[in-house]
Image: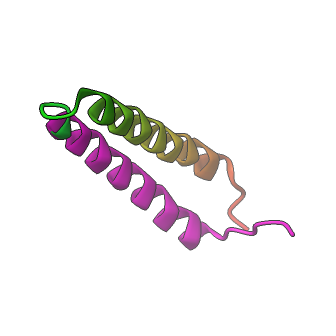
Amino acid sequence: MALLLNSKRLHTLIWVLVYGGLLTLVLGLSVQRSDDELGWSMVAAGFAVALLGFALVFVRARMKAG
């Protein structure tokens, strides 16, 4: 089953991924003070999620308006 995303849903997904990823990244930096391994894992995961959100910005820009 194909995942169909209209413009509004994609826009919402982009912001959730960007802000969620950046929040996880910052929390990972904070957690890193007490648990280095967990902190770096959270930083890496947050960075990847935020990067996915930024990549979807370009996907949205390439979508047709119809």
- Residue 45: % across, % down: 43, 39
Residue 19 falls within the magenta-colored stretch: yes
Q: How does the figure colour the protein chain or chains?
A: rainbow
Residue 35, given in percent of the width and then of the height, sits at 21, 33
Q: Is residue 56 above or below residue 2?
A: above
Which residue sits at x=55%, y=72%?
8
Image location of residue 54, percent across then percent down: 48, 42
Q: Which residues are magenta?
A: 1-30
Q: Is residue 3 left or right of residue 34?
A: right
Quadrant position of the N terminus in the picture? bottom right
Q: Residue shown at 47%/37% (left/top)?
A: 48
Query: Compared with residue 28, is residue 16 higher up or lower down, i.e. above or below?
Result: below
Is residue 24 a member of the stretch shown in magenta?
A: yes
Q: Residue at x 57, y 63 (%)?
A: 10
3 shown above or below 22: below
Q: Is residue 17 above or below residue 34?
A: below
The front one of 23 and 13 is 23
**Residue at screen point 31% across, 29% down:** 37
Q: Residue furthest right?
A: 1
Quadrant of image for the C terminus: bottom right
Instruction: Give left or right: position of 43 versus 51.
Output: left
The quarter of the picture where residue 28 lies is top left
The secondary structure that dominates the magenta segment is helix
Q: How many marks?
A: 0
